[in-house]
Image: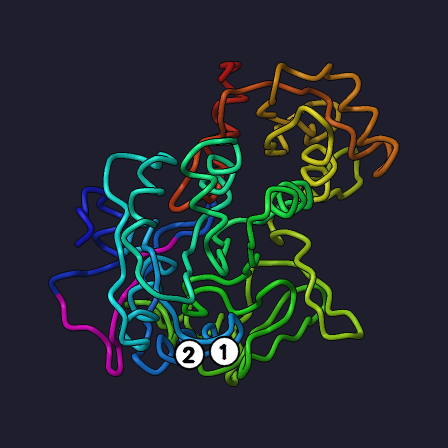
Amino acid sequence: MLPFTDPALRDAMAPDEPAEPDTAVVIATSGSTGAPKGVLLSARALTASAEATHVRLGGPGHWLLATPAHYIGGLQVLVRSLLAGTEPTFLTGTGFRPDDFAAAAAKLTGGPRYTALVPTQLVRLLDDDGGAGLAAAKTFDAIVVGAAATSAALRERAADAGVRIVPAYGMSETASGCVYDGFPLDGVRVDVEGDRIRIAGDVLAHGYRRQPELTAESFDGGWFTTSDRGVRHDDGRVEVLGRADDMINTGGVKVSANAIERVLTAQPGVRDACVVGLPDQEWGEAVVALVVPEGGPREADELRAAVRAELGAAATPKRVEYAADLPLRGPGKIDRAAVKQRLESGLRG
């Protein structure tokens, strides 16, 4: 059970009041910047998601729970295990350590073997070159990677290491990942209206806890309108371009923070990056990047030049700062508000 120490979260979840009809579970969520919300999920939605996941992965299997069960990704590991009739194993210990992951994986019996991780956890396993954690990761038939975007560089690292990952896109409102490796799960429909991604299917939540106006705004005619921008290609593949609120208006030109982050994380020596717009008297908003280096910081001018070459002058960060890691909100989601606060305060990670 969640410790409702945050008054706003407690108000959103209303743990002392009866749940809305047809609600099996209420999941707390806030995205990367928003206020806390309680997502109402039915047993039908949870089951539809779990069954479609097994169909896509190759059949029911044995799951390792490596993320907190009060988040939708962790809860779905338990639901999938229940429907498969298998006993999940659990990652124990504080934090995420490759050796602990290996110990939990060793308790799995039978197959197929599955787990669900966030990108940060996957990176730690890949960094465990020659260790038990990476060796254990290679034994899984599929590792679903969700909660945050999986960069092209991270996909390549996993493939080179022999780790079979399945990048997933979804959210609490879709009962976890509903698009696997770019393609919607069976029973899930994805549409792009303007540039906003919309999702329909049995996996959908039926609203937000005690927020009928927000429910009516977000869920309409069987469709859920996400806060993400994307495109749907002719072959049915869905490409997520970033959040609708990640656009930065600098000097009258709108640029995508997500696009800039993709360029930065593709550069050698960059493990992760977050780009935000900070108030600026000259530009309105200045593009500023917080970069997590790998093997020593890259020269800021080199990183800025890479962005300029691919995205143009307007997208080029005015400042590049460095940190040992990025602040996270929930399971693997970058806390952009905390990044802004860190950069505005002038702190170095």
Front residue of 298 and 194: 298
Q: Residues within 10 Å of mark 2 (few under 14, many from 20)?
A: some
Disc 2 target residue: 51
Mark 2–mark 1 Cα distance, whole angstroms, equals 6 Å
Could you tell me which residue is drawn at 67 percent across and 40 percent down?
A: 153
Depicted 165 relative to depicted 307: above or below? below
Q: Secondary structure at mark 2?
A: helix
Vertical relation: 303 (above or below) 126: above
Contact between marks 2 and 1 (CB within 8 A): the answer is yes
**Residue positioned 77% across, 69% down in the render:** 233
Q: Which residues are magenta?
A: 17-29
Locate the N terminus by quadrant.
bottom left
How far from the left and from the top, in percent, is residue 167? 57, 57
Q: Position of residue 196 (x, y in %)?
A: 65, 65
Q: Is residue 309 above or below residue 256?
A: above
User: Residue 130, position in %: x, y?
Assistant: 50, 31
Q: Residue at x 60, y 52 (%)?
A: 243
Is 228 colored magenta in this rendering? no
* Predominant SS along the magenta part: loop
Q: Amino acid at mark 2?
A: Glu
At 63% from the left and 34% from the top, the residue drawn is 275
| View extreme (left): residue | 16
Return the residue at label 1.
55
Q: Amino acid at mark 1?
A: Val
Q: Foreground residue, 283 or 76?
A: 76
